[in-house]
Image (tube, rainbow, N blue to C red):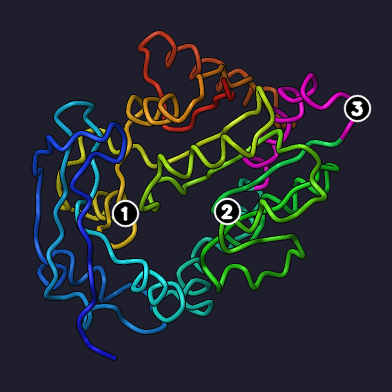
Amino acid sequence: MNKKSKFRERNQCINCGSSDLKVLSSGYFGHEPLRSRIENAPWGESPLPYIENEKWIFVRCNKCAQAFHKRILTPEWNEIRFSKWMTQEAIKTFEEPTNTPEHHFNRAKFLTSHILRIEKNTRKLRGRGPVRVLDFGCGWGEFLAICERFGFVCCGVDRSSARRQNENNVKIFPEIEDVKKINDLGQGFHVATLFQVLEHLDSPLEILEALRNLLVPGGILIIETPDCTDVVNIKDESDYWKIHPLDHINAFTPSTLRNIAVKAGFQPINKDVVYITSDPKNVIINEIKRFVRRIIKKPKTQQYFCKI
């Protein structure tokens, strides 16, 4: 294989379509501090020989303030990334540090809180029928497996061939187009979820519009991304994980996340309060945090929407 990868340029804003872009930072994959972080990450096959002489360019739209990486891998090389670089073994190695009882417990609580909100927010949409959920970028299908325990009907989409080889026995398709071919989910989904996914997508607005078309009228959209407020360069590990130019190619803030969902045909809704705890003190502490957050008006990049 040719040891030179291929990139393409996004010359228009991924959010509003403007071509008025400002370069915030740039560099080469083979230069520090990026090189060492890529070298030390677990890979099936290291991407460095293919990308080290390639340039990354992080830009921000002067019209809507959306930030994103201008140069991204071509579809052909993205497929190589998922099939050869990010192998099942490499992903398992990467996730190994979080493979602890405490992490799994907290993760299950987190996902269950969303499930309880989903059940409440879809009562009028589904009547007495089951909730129909589409998890886009579903990974190993962990959320879908828990949803099924609650009686939901669901499926997922994930372009990683490694993650589609899961042990959760849930339906996972490689492309959103494949979802349209199945006929056992009624007239549409009640809910679409994207947990830590939108930052990875070549065309996030296009995907949100496609998901909107799969939802019933008034259907719920849940999005969660890293908060990239004030991130303009890759100076330390925190910056790297938020705007890694090979992977986290879109950088959202609370306002730009809301803007792109609205542009796709959704409107913001309030996220219901849910507590899953056996300790009343946790409720009091979280209520205080929620009150302070409301007073200082600090929004988050985990947001709920409904289809207009």
Asked if the residue under mark 1 is in contact with the one under mark 3, i.e. CB atoms within 8 Å, the reply is no
Q: Which residue is mark 1?
A: 241
Q: Position of residue 189 (x, y in %)?
A: 71, 38
Secondary structure, mark 2, is: helix
Which residue shows up at 36% across the image and 67% down it? 75
Q: Whole-Å distance between the Cαs marked 1 and 2?
A: 26 Å
Q: Is residue 243 above or below residue 78?
A: above
Secondary structure, mark 3, is: loop
Q: How many marks?
A: 3
Q: Position of residue 179 (x, y in %)?
A: 66, 53
Extreme-top residue of the structure: 295
Secondary structure, mark 1, is: helix
Q: Nearer the viewer, residue 179 or 78?
A: 179
* In the image, residue 308 lies in the stretch drawn in magenta: no
Q: Main secondary structure of the magenta part?
A: helix
Q: Nearer the viewer, residue 263 or 108?
A: 263
Extreme-bottom residue of the structure: 1
Question: Mark 3 or mark 2, which has the lower sequence index?
Answer: 3
Residue 176: which numbered mark, if any?
A: 2
Quadrant in the rendering for residue 171: bottom right
Q: Locate the N terminus by quadrant.
A: bottom left
Question: Mark 3 or mark 1, which has the lower sequence index?
Answer: 3
Which residue shows up at 23% across the image and 26% down it? 64
Q: Which residues are magenta?
A: 108-129
Residue 128: which numbered mark, if any?
A: 3
